[in-house]
Image: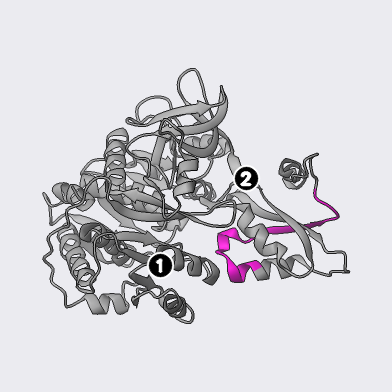
Amino acid sequence: MNTYDYFAERFLQSPARIFLEADSGEIFTYADVEQETARYANFLINLGLKTGDRVAVQVEKSPQAVLLYLACLRAGLCYLPLNNAYQQGEIRYFLGDAEPAVAICSPQNLAWFPALCDDAKVPHTFTLDQNGAGSFIDAASPSSTQFVTATSKPDDLAVIIYTSGTTGRSKGAMVTHGNLTSNARVLCDAWRIRFSDTLIHALPIFHIHGLFVALNTILLSGAKLIFHRKFDASAVINALPRATMLMGVPTFYTRLLTETSFTREPCKSMRLFVSGSAPLLLDTFNEFHERSGHTILERYGMSEAGMICSNPYDGERRGGSVGKPLPGVTLRIDGGETGGIEIKGANVFSGYWRMPEKTAEEFTADGYFRTGDIGAIDRDGYVAIVGRAKDLIISGGFNVYPREIELLIDAIPGVAESAVIGVPHPDFGEAVTAVIVRSSNGSTLTDADVISHVKTELASFKVPKRVHFVEELPRNTMGKVQKNILRQQFSS
């Protein structure tokens, strides 16, 4: 069954119920969801799109962007969300690799986005802005509000999520209808998400946390969203008395704690605070409990598998732990007590888009996916993420792979070599930091020069917060840069 059908089975029992209350004042009922997704789906199909065709979307967060995601599921198309911070070099690669039939961008990118689409031979290009207006909405407006949802099998492609690679080449994780529905069902049960819930949604919707975890569970339970386009601590605190749940990255919680108005009083109606996408500091975990009276539920997931582990809803939620594997997920550690985390389950993706060799490399002979994370399991079955393979940096909840940035910095005139590391940061969790050896030709390169150059090519969350210049990079006997030494040296 199509993922949309699973959602509609529940939410169409109460079509007049409010699905989404936007910070702009807009209200969308579940009847609106049914009609508007039909309108968008009809328009896309009438353009000539067929099952599995990709729809690339790089837009600001809006209710209409949510409806577009659902319309793609409903029509049997493949939704391709792209971070709205991505720049030209990144978008050029995604369009060329995914070969979408439709690409939709924010109006502020019209100076360069359509030209990239022309180069990639994308047949149809539209706009959609943060207010839910644009050429896509105008063109779809006359379409019918009746649509027969496409039949989809569990292993049919639903979404491609691009994840950065250590070689600099991003990989498209192929997420199926079966992956989406199985994970949403498990989470609704594990976190007791019900029709009566109201979730504050302040996450981006180009990332699985905001797109799958937050949206899909609410749709599957027929619950309600208080929809914030961006996270604002004061606005979230004002919304807490009307809500029961908040899902966020650690940065959300550190910023809430800086507000004097964040006390137990506005949290009285809340039953669940969820944190993920980056490690939650134990100090934040403890201070949040002291201030709010609530214990944050930390979980663990990734683009290739949705949610993998969770602290319990009922039972001990341990700071520094991501809890136990969710029902239906088998997790093991390769290498003894501490080692690579490997997983198997209905939540695990089907492979990397057009990368059969990479797919084969990341799965074991007995079908487990190698996550690339290093973990340990204690005697009670709680999992702790103790390290990350391949030098992954998580900054503000976003994955940052150093190699992509290093390749760009190394090409700057005046740079001999570079190493990019993550260092502790009180707000972002980790701050991207570049360590550079200037070339020996009397280079006068400055940190401002480096940051300015990276800003023009990569998303803002990948831009180094600090740049340090050194005489040489520390290396081991095999010539490999010892990033652990750099992290120790620049951690302050």
Residue farthest along the front direction in this orientation: 357
Residue 339 horizontal side relative to residue 448, left or right? left
| Residue beneath the point at 59% across and 46% down | 392
The picture quadrant where one finds residue 354 is bottom left
Which secondary structure, mark 1?
Answer: loop
Residue 233 horizontal side relative to residue 149, left or right? right
| Residue beneath the point at 75% across and 46% down | 481
The picture quadrant where one finds residue 217 is top left
Q: Amino acid at mark 2?
A: Asp
Where residue 7 appears, as percent x and y from the top left, is: 20, 49
Q: Amino acid at mark 1?
A: Glu
Residue farthest along the bottom direction in this orientation: 111
Residue 391 tag number: 2
Label 1: which residue?
Answer: 60
Residue 398 tag number: none
Which secondary structure, mark 2?
Answer: helix
Q: Which residues are magenta?
A: 454-473
| Residue beneath the point at 36% across and 32% down | 329
Q: Is residue 282 magenta?
A: no
